[in-house]
Image: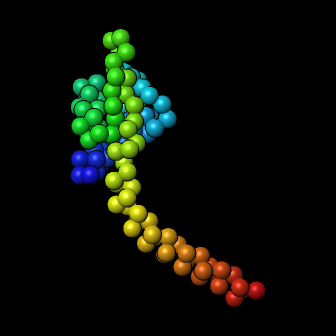
Amino acid sequence: MDAVLQALADPSRRTVLEILRDHQASAGELAEALPIARPGVSRHLRVLREAGLVEVRSEGQRRIYSLRADALVEVDEWLEDYRALWQHRLDALHTEIARGKKARR
């Protein structure tokens, strides 16, 4: 999970994942979407591959990247306790707002 979290820490890599969430893309297409030089994009793609977040296949001379969402399952499970904490707090806030509306009537 540490490798996934480290990969997610970089905004350029998150942008790549957002693009790949919607569709597969070539390395060139991904490079066009980022404000960095192609060697930098290649390094980001390598980090994402090593973390298991993307997979690559060759299509002629192009390399096509796609998201491996299953790599995020462990992070999702780890975040579940934090989601429960926030849900409890949001439920309490909703209750207080409802009480305030009743008190104004």
Quarter of the figure with the C terminus: bottom right
Q: In the image, is 103 to the left or to the right of 95?
A: right
Horizontal side, residue 64 vs residue 88: left or right: left
Residue 48 seen anywhere in this rendered image of the structure: yes
* Residue placed furthest toward the right: 105
Determine if residue 47 is in view. no
Q: Position of residue 95 (x, y in %)?
A: 60, 80
Q: Say above or below: 3 vs 42.
A: below
Measured as percent of width and height from the top left, residue 7 is found at 28, 44
* Residue 104 placement, left or right of 3: right
Farthest residue toward the top?
60
Residue 67 at x, y = what percent? 39, 36
User: How many numbered discs?
Assistant: 0
Q: Position of residue 70 (x, y in %)?
A: 38, 44
The quadrant holding residue 51 is top left
Q: How is the image coloured?
A: rainbow
Q: Nearer the viewer, residue 37 or 77?
A: 77
Which residue is rendered at x = 44% and y = 65% of the image? 83
Q: Which residue is rendered at x = 35% and y = 11% of the image?
A: 60
Q: Using the image, determine if residue 29 lies above or below residue 59.
A: below
Q: Is residue 14 left or right of residue 94?
A: left
Q: Residue at x 28, y 47 (%)?
A: 4
Residue drawn at 23 percent across, 52 percent down:
2
Furthest residue in direction bottom, as rendered: 103
